[in-house]
Amino acid sequence: MYPTNNFQLRLDSFVQHYFNTFDNADARNNLLSLYRPESMLVWEGSQHQGAQNIISALTKPELKVVKTMINTNDATPSINGGVLVVVTGNLAIDNAFDKPLHFTATFSLQPIPGQPGGFFVYSHIFRLIL
C-alpha cells in the first residue's frame, strides 16, 4: 500500500524541519529531540550512537556554515510502524553555492513508544555523492 497525501505532507514537513534546523548552526542542537539513546548515525562512514554523540557529530566546526537544497524526498512504510525516508540534495559549505556537493540522507523513523503519532530517528545515514 502506498502512502497517502497526508503521509506525504508529514514527510515533507519532517524533511523541511530537519534540514532547516540543520542549516542554522545556532539551532542545530534542537535536532537532539529527534534522536534517542538507541539512535545511530553514519556520517560519511563515521559511526555515532546516542543522541548526544550524534549532535556532537552534526555540530562539528567544519559544518558551522552550511546550506542544504533538497531535490527529492521519498518514503515508504517499514517494519513495526516505521518509515524509511530517502532524501537527495545539494550541500553548500561556507556559502560556496557555486560548488555544491551532492548528498543523500537516509532516515529510519520509528514510533516513539507511548506517544501516538510521534516518531524518532532510529537510524540516519548521510553520504556525499562524488
Image (cartoon, rainbow, N blue to C red):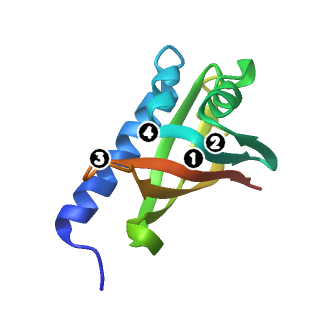
Q: Amino acid at mark 4?
A: Tyr
Q: Is residue 21 above or below residue 49?
A: above
> Quick one: label 4, few (<14), some, or many (20+) residues within 10 Å?
some
Q: Is residue 9 rendered to the left or right of residue 78?
A: left
Q: Secondary structure at mark 1?
A: strand
Q: Position of residue 31 (x, y in %)?
A: 48, 30
Q: Position of residue 16 (x, y in %)?
A: 36, 42
Question: In the image, residue 18 lies at what x, y percent?
Answer: 43, 39
> Could you tell me the amino acid type at mark 1?
Asn
Residue at x 48% of width, y 43% of height: 69
Residue 121 seen by the camera: yes
Seen as rendered, the residue at the extreme left is 6
The nearer-to-camera label among 3 and 2 is 3
Q: In the figure, 101 relative to 21: above or below?
A: below
Of badges 1 and 3, the one in the foreground is 3
Q: Mark 2 sits on what residue? A: 100
**To which residue does mark 3 refer?**
115
Amino acid type for the residue under numbered disc 3: Gln
| 47 displayed left or right of 53 | right
| Marks 1/3: CA–CA distance | 33 Å
Per the image, the residue denoted by label 1 is: 90
Residue most extreme to the right: 45
In terms of sequence position, does the residue under pointer 4 or pointer 2 come before the other? Answer: 4
Is residue 78 among the parts visible in the rendering? no
Q: Around disc 3, counting alpha carbons within 10 Å, would you say few (fewer than 14), some (14 to 19), or many (20 or more)?
A: few
Q: Mark number for residue 18?
A: 4
Give the position of the N terminus as an image quadrant.
Answer: bottom left
